[in-house]
Amino acid sequence: MRTPRPRSLAGQLFAMQVVLVAAIVGGFALFSYAMDRSQAEETARRQTTAAAAAVADHPSVVAAVRSADPTALLQPYTERLRKDAGVDFVVVMTPDGRRWTHPEPGRIGHVYLGHIDEARKGRTVSETYTGTLGPSVRTVAPVRDGSGRTVALVSAGITIDKISEQLGRQVGALLGMAGAALALGGLGTYVVNSRLRRHTHGMNAAELSRRHDYHEATLHAVREGLLMLDGQRRIALINDGARELLGLGPDAVGRNAGGLGLPPGLTGALLGSEPRVDELHLTAERVLVVSTQPVVGGERRGTVVTLRDHTELQSLTGELDSERGFTRALRAQAHEAANRLHTVVSLIELGRVGEAVEFATAELDLAQVLTDRVVTAVGEPVLAALLLGKAAQAGESGVELVLTDDSRIDDGVLPPWLPARDLVTVLGNLIDNAVEASSAPGPSRAPAVPSPRGDARSPAGAAPSRSAAGTAPSRSAAGRPGDAAGPAAPAGHTAHTGAAGTRPRVEVTARADEDELVLRVSDTGPGLGPGEAEAVFARGWSTRGPGRGLGLALVRQAVHRGGGTVEATRSPCGGAEFTVRLPLRTPEAAL
């Protein structure tokens, strides 16, 4: 047997509100009835008191009482007064209670039914008593002569039936008003609960409670950030992941998205009215993938925003990209090595052994000088491996990579809060940009430093295991073992000239001073245009077309995490120069 589904929350509230409205209206009606009855009885007392006082104070009544036949004089008077005053009876009696007048003449001469002791003592009293006409509200007053002696009593009264008749008319009107109030209350309750039923989708309280519990559990269990904005772009809902990714505090709910202090690009995405899918945005410390979807129901009701942390994936993608670059460099080096080996074999076959030995050992010396120069100057193994790998890649592009003489980083100098991955991101991006700028054909290229990767890829250095791979340069007349830390252009590669007709060249300075780490990369490319020194760090800025412009933005982000600075200036070589300064000691330690 199927268990009946509980009534929806809107239905339960409707029933409860109807009962509540009915109870309120009924209670008010009963209260009004009781008050009206009390007021009706009080009005009757005042009315009878006024009538009795009017008779008792009239001089003709005293004269009639002293006459030989008081009834003949008083009966017409009291009947006329009874009708005029709107009371049911006016009875004039002797001090001992025998009637002189009565609305029913057959009752005249009989003893008055009621309490008259207080009236005989000269006081006016009111009471509810059952007399010959039935229950009534009556007032008894003394009639005094000129000396103040009580010579008669007068009683005026209104029956309860008449009071009830008057009250019944009032109660009818009251019930009509109560019915109208109940109908209006029920109609308003129905309208409100119909709206509530639409908003709650007809769910009952248990279903809503269960849905809320699931909602809260899901909201806090999801690692990705979830943000909901209302129609005024204020935060209506935010989970723990979004708070962490955006760096917001517990007071984020209710704040406008434009006042959160986020980067302009990310703020524009949150405030935009169009949907966005998997857009990359940078905050001070993270790379975020942002998707937005407006909530529309006749009008814009808000926006649902999802945030995913792309920082780690971006670094891994950059490492994979570097590995691919190293693979290409090794493939080219293998090709060059085969060519050199064929040359050595041919020289031996021609009987020119001495020249063959000289040719082979010259290549080995050149490679060893490069390795020794980098390893001696840079004791940090990750940076040394990065420089050797980038030197091989630069050589394949026909660019000479030089490590300046003042470069010196001993092993163990870098503090723990300065991770090697961030240094690889910074130096790898800057070198890639410099090599790309220096190897660009012709000096007429737009004067800007392009980003080395697309929006979905971040450059990073190679793993330390690649430190010795692909470092042997090809032979070139320009390759001087004594002054270059990078290889010359490989055989068959046409090297483009840089600024002022010089050979493409990238100079790298990596120096650890007492308090700071200095990384400087300069090139012989076209350099920066006026006003571009700051714009180059914006995400999406590039002269290489759409889908690029993330590398330098990642550089600034990594430098910001390390508490350092980065600036772009004109290089002495004619191109661009980027200088990064990172503190090696915390401010507390410096003090």
Image (cartoon, grey):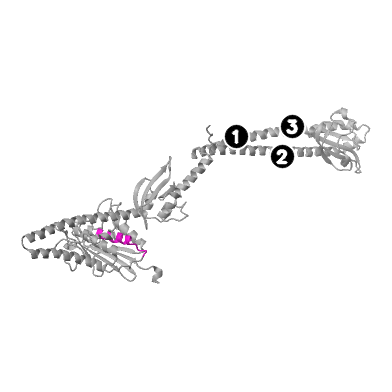
Q: Residues within 10 Å of mark 3 (few under 14, many from 20)?
A: few
| Residue 423 on the magenta span | yes
Q: Residues within 10 Å of mark 2 (few under 14, many from 20)?
A: few
> In the figure, is residue 254 to the left or right of 446?
right
> In the figure, is residue 137 to the left or right of 195?
right
Quick check: can you spot residue 463?
A: yes
Q: Which residue is mark 3?
A: 165
Between discs 1 and 3, the one toward the N terminus: 3
Mark 3 residue element: helix
> Magenta residues, as a range?
416-433
Residue at the image point whose x is 47% and y is 45% from the top: 214
Where residue 183 is drawn, which disc sits there?
A: 1
Front label number (1 vs 3): 1
Label 1 and label 3: CA atoms lie apart by: 27 Å
Q: Are marks 2 and 3 in contact (CB under 8 Å)?
A: no
Given the image, on which type of amino acid does mark 1 rest? Ala
Mark 2 residue element: helix
Residue 419, picture quadrant: bottom left
Between discs 1 and 2, the one toward the N terminus: 2
Q: Which residue is mark 2?
A: 35
